[in-house]
Amino acid sequence: MEKLLKILLLEDSESDAGLIQRELKKGNLNFTAKLVDTKEEFENAIKNFNPDVILADHSLPSFNSLGALEIVRELKITVPFILVTSTTSEEITASVMKAGAWDYILKDRMSRLPMAIESAMEKWKLEKEKEKYLEQLTRNERKFRGIIENSYDIVSLLTKNSESLYRSPSSERITGWTDEDQKHGSAFEMTHPEDIETLKKVVKKTYENPGISFPVSFRTRHKNGNYLWIEGVITNMLHDEAINGIITNYRDVTERKKLNDLLKEYNDRHEIVSKATNDAIWDWNIEEDHEVWNHGMESLFGYPIREMHDIKNWQKSKIYPGDYERIQQEIETAFTEKAENWTSRYKFLCSSGNYKHVLDRAYILYNGDKPLRMIGAMQDITEQVISEQMVLSLIERYEIVLDTIGNAVWDWDLTDDTTVWGKGLSRLFGYQVEGNVTNTFWNEKIHEDDLNRILEFINEVINDPKKNRWEVEYRFRKSDGNYAFVHDMGTVIRDKNGKAVRMVGSMQDITERIRSIEEIKKLSLVASKISNAVIIADQNGLIEWVNEGFTRLCGFQLTEVQGKTASFLQGPETDRAIIKRMSERIKQHKFVSEEIVNYSKNGNKYWSKLDITPIFNEHNELTNFISVQTDITELKQFEQSITSIARELSGLIEYANVPIFGIDRNGYINEWNKTATRLSGYSKNEVFGKKWINFLDQKFHAKVQVVLDSALEGNSVNNFELPFVSKMGNQLTLLISISTRMDVNKKVMGVLCVGQDLTELIQYRQGLEKLVAERTQELNEALNKEKELVEMKSKFVSIASHEFRTPLSTISLVSGFLSKHREKLNQDEFNLKLASIDKQVNHMTYLLDDILMIGKSEAGKIQPLIKPVAIVQFIQQLCQEVEQNSKTHTINVQENCSITEINADEKLLRNIVINLLTNAIKFSPQENSVFVRISNSKEYLKLEVEDHGIGIVKEDIGTVFTSFNRGSNVGTIQGTGLGLSIVKKAVELLHGDVTLTSEVNRGTSFTITLPLHST
Amino acid sequence: MKKILLVEDTAEVLEILSDLLRMEGYHIQGSINGIDALNRLASFFPDLIITDLRMPIMDGFALLEELKKTKALAMIPVLVFSANATPEIEEKSLKLGAAGFLKKPINTDILIETVKTILEV
């Protein structure tokens, strides 16, 4: 730009002014600026500075842009006036634009300023050229005006009473009335009633001001009844005698009026601000084939503003070839149908070579049937179209996907309340629809109980610009009349003002799911109560429900986890390999059972036994996963401690200093420690998996098998001695203890044998055993003797105490009696009592003799005094003595002896005979006699003593000769148990023999044999 | 005159006991075992029975049991004495209905005192 551009800057803020100048410099403008901020300065500057362009802030302390524009208009300044403002009020902007501003720039978009100035200057130049052109045209026209006017205008001459004197021929052509018709009344008769007053006023003015022409505008009735708009001038020429009338000059302006009204309506309807600033407005004069554009032509498409001719060609060069034919046809159709409006979308070529999508809306003016002009506005809708296309392609893709997965996809145009349905509608619900259907189709199918809720909900979403996506569930009637539960999801598409224009979405039949959820709910009642943690997830693993046990175990509430995957339970120690394995199985819809580390909400680690079961519906489609978790932390800890114990144990076993080996249930070796290897010579590898029994000598097999079987039944075996031949051929003896190995269920798994090498020990023991046996024998003998003595002692104590008590009792009573009643007794009575004391003392002396006798004989202290004894006489004497002492029995003696004397000890003989006789009497209390037989052989004397008493029980016969032993059937018969013992000792001392035969309750017979010549 | 039946298998003891109690002014009859005593009781109804425990044929315990079987005899107090005087024996005697228990050898004064006490109750 070579010419220096003079810019008048109406701006009160110096910083803004600076900013503006900086922007202009940035735009490489060659300019000089004058800054003003009051009305006076502005007026002065207009006149003296003579600016090329005016940049005005809207609001100044004492002035504003509207005032500035007024001054510009008054002074008939035509330079571009650009509003540079910080206001975003469209009202103010619109009023300033209406008042004549060329353009407006927002202060925060100042970068557009240089371009705006340049384009304004371009436009100004064009305006100037156009003005020049129009001026020239006007001049040319004036030449022909009379003719043109005559041909088109109505010229009439009226009298001062408004009576028609003359009217041009055009009058009939335009109004339809003939001269004849006109003669019947005044001009006012044809005037529209609303306009009569105005017209009369003008006419009155005319009369008052002769020679001056007054413009007039009114409606007059055509002969066909329609009103025509008439415009013209009235001139009072009554004073001119040559004319003496009132001249009217009218023109039919109906079409123009109509156009003005239309434009007005158009302006009102479509916010003129955006149109004036953004849209490209064109005015196509069809007849004259030229077109005028506003600045939008440049700002939108980058073409300089100029008048264009040969419009059809111009259109062809600019409209996208794919659209051109259609547009031409649409326009032709509009013309043919005499349509007043025309709207279309197409692509329009920009100067940059790109196409822009435009929405073109135009009004068509006709002259009769002939289109005269088209005035239209083109709006850049490229972004809108692109986003719409994106949405459409998205919807298409979405529809394909959803259709294939069995959803019913819909596309609801809110502007005409129609819906296009996808194929899913017929597949899911059985309805066949084609193309757009009114939305009533959908409303009617909703269950009446759900309808209001759904409609209210959707309306709420539509009216709330912040909401775009919605989901509802309701019952939808299928073509067979049954209701399906549906899940309906929609997305609202809004225009740039946030108004909902369209909704797309999909309906899913969830009847099965609802049903299964209901079933699950029933199950969950149970599940909620069980202590395990239960999760129910959908087929994608998103949690739908958890039970109370889950909350207890993991700490999460249902609301916290719903819709998530359960992966939040995992943590640093969770085994990734297990997770991977689980996911693979879940992907294959297989049952999962794992033990895994999980974490509760508060971060506590726990071991979980996790079972995941996929759930299928009747069509064998996966619907849910149910996971059950059991807290096995304690079990795991136990297991781990057991494992460590086991590890320790196996170490102990392996390195123990004794042979240890294990045998499984089937007799195969499954453990073999180092010592076992060393002792046996067989390595672990040689014995593992082989039968233990095969390493043993054949002859032990049966015995070992019995022991092993017993151990496998759970009985531990201790110290089982086992001969064994090592691999090297050494003979070994092992002492083995076998314990049972059980699994956790107490099932016997095998046995563990712990051995001890006894080989050396055995050899030593064998020597030792002999020694011990000898010693033991000795000890046993001594012990038995000792035992006998102890037994004898206790028997002596008990028998002696009893046997002495009775005589003592008697003595005590008698002595008591004597001391009490001494004086009352005579001498005889007194002696008798003393004699009874003597008798008891004698009895006790016998008892003591017996005891001493035994004592002596036991101690081996009796030395028999052998001398000749007159044996027959001796025995008979003793028999008499015993018989005298007994008050009950007689003694029958049979003597058949060839000898009279034997060599023997008298005392011992007496012991023998007295004891046998007193026993015979004592043990036959029911009888009154005992029998004695004496005989002899060459060498022996034979003495038999027989009674018919109680006899001796067979079992007691072996022990009757033992001291203090008494027969078990003696009852209350008194005795010390010494008698027979004394007999036997005495017989033995005399080198004789004693035998007995006896039968219970029949009697006993003792036979004594004594050598005739004892030494 | 109070009547006493003495049951004792040892003749010497029976004799001296009878003498002692007669001197105290009681009418005494003697038996040498339980059976003998029961036979005697058919014709002789004593105010007191004094018996040894250890006797042939029928001992003192058996006698006590037999006495309990007949209502009239069960009322007669029984004084028991024994050479084998363990606490168990004494307890058993008292359980079987004995009114008193004396140990052999018998102290004359204690015997007379005991008999007197039982009979005067």
Image: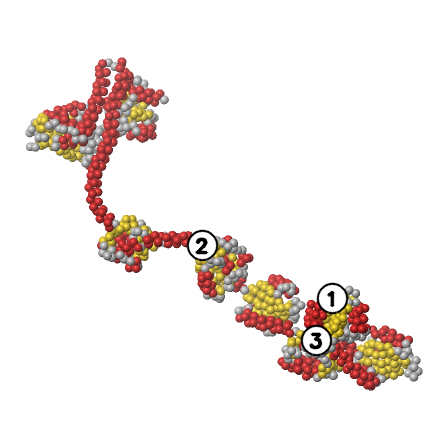
Mark 3 and mark 2: Cα distance apart in space:
78 Å
Q: Position of residue A862 (x, y in %)?
A: 15, 29
Q: Nearer the viewer, mark 2 or mark 1?
A: 1
Residue A1003 visible to the viewer:
no
Q: Nearer the viewer, residue A340 or A635?
A: A635
Q: Nearer the viewer, residue A136 or A487?
A: A136
Q: Nearer the viewer, mark 3 or mark 1?
A: 1
The subunit letter for the residue under badge 1 reads: A
Q: Which disc number belongs to residue A14?
A: 1
For marks 3 and 2 on the same chain, the one whose residue lies earlier in the sequence: 3
Q: Nearer the viewer, mark 3 or mark 2?
A: 3
Q: Position of residue A607 (x, y in %)?
A: 46, 55
The residue positioned 12% from the left and 32% from the top of the image is A991
Q: Which disc number belongs to residue A632?
A: 2
Residue A67 visible to the viewer:
yes
Q: Nearer the viewer, residue A42 or A147?
A: A42
Q: Quadrant of residue A781?
A: top left
Q: Position of residue A921 (x, y in %)?
A: 18, 28
Picture layout, residue A333 above or below residue A897: below
The residue positioned 33% from the left and 26% from the top of the image is B99
What SS does tag 1 mark? helix
The subunit letter for the residue under badge 2 reads: A
Check contact, mark 3 vs mark 2: CB within 8 A.
Answer: no
- What amino acid is labelled 1 in the image? Glu
Mark 3 and mark 1: Cα distance apart in space:
32 Å
Say left or right for A897 vs A440. Answer: left
Check contact, mark 3 vs mark 1: CB within 8 A.
Answer: no
Q: Quadrant of residue A950?
A: top left
